Image (tube, helix red, strand yellow):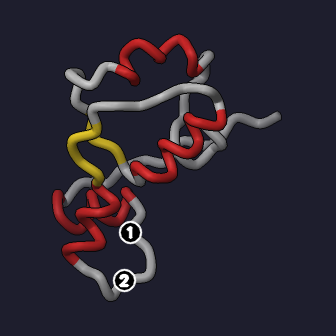
Amino acid sequence: VNGNALLFDGDVSTLGKWLSDEKATKAVHDAKGLKLALCNLGVEIRGISDDVLLMGYLLDPTRQSHPLTLLAEKYLSRALSVPEAPKK
């Protein structure tokens, strides 16, 4: 979705059933941005149990940004690779 919220090489609407299933819990990064991006595509997301961006802010509110790569490295000692966006 828009290159920032979700990298998925298919039709996002095919995930609609799972995304809208409140019982299928989902941990996301930037729930607000994801909800807005999916809403623009006509897809609803339910069942968000965790927002890693919000957690990062609560742990360090003085930081300007809380990218997933930084949070994974800082709190999990894991380096995440960042896939390149597909060229159009």
26 over 3 or under it: above or below: above
Check disc 1: other Cα within 10 Å, few if <14, some if 14-19, many if 20+.
Answer: some
Q: Which residue is found at the position 36% from the left and 83% from the top?
A: 63
Task: Residue 65 in the image: state x and y as whole percent.
Answer: 44, 74
Residue ID at (27%, 25%): 22
Q: Residue at (34%, 60%) from the top-left corner? A: 53
Relative to 25, 86 lies left or right:
right
Q: Amino acid at mark 2?
A: Arg
Q: Secondary structure at mark 2?
A: loop
Farthest right residue in view: 88
Cα separation, mark 2 vs mark 1, equals: 7 Å
Secondary-structure class at tag 1: loop
Residue at the disc numbered 1: 66
Residue at the far bottom in the pictured view: 62
The residue under label 2 is: 63
Q: Residues within 10 Å of mark 2 (few under 14, many from 20)?
A: few
Count of number-bearing discs: 2
Which amino acid, mark 1? His
35 left or right of 41 in image: left
Quadrant housing residue 55: bottom left
Q: On screen, 57 above or below 80?
A: below
Front-most of residues 26 and 78:
26
Please name whichever residue, 8 or 77, is drawn nearer the observer in this view of the structure: 8
Q: Quadrant of the C terminus?
A: top right
Measured as percent of width and height from the top left, residue 71 is found at: 29, 63
Residue name at image x 39 percent, y 23 percent: 19
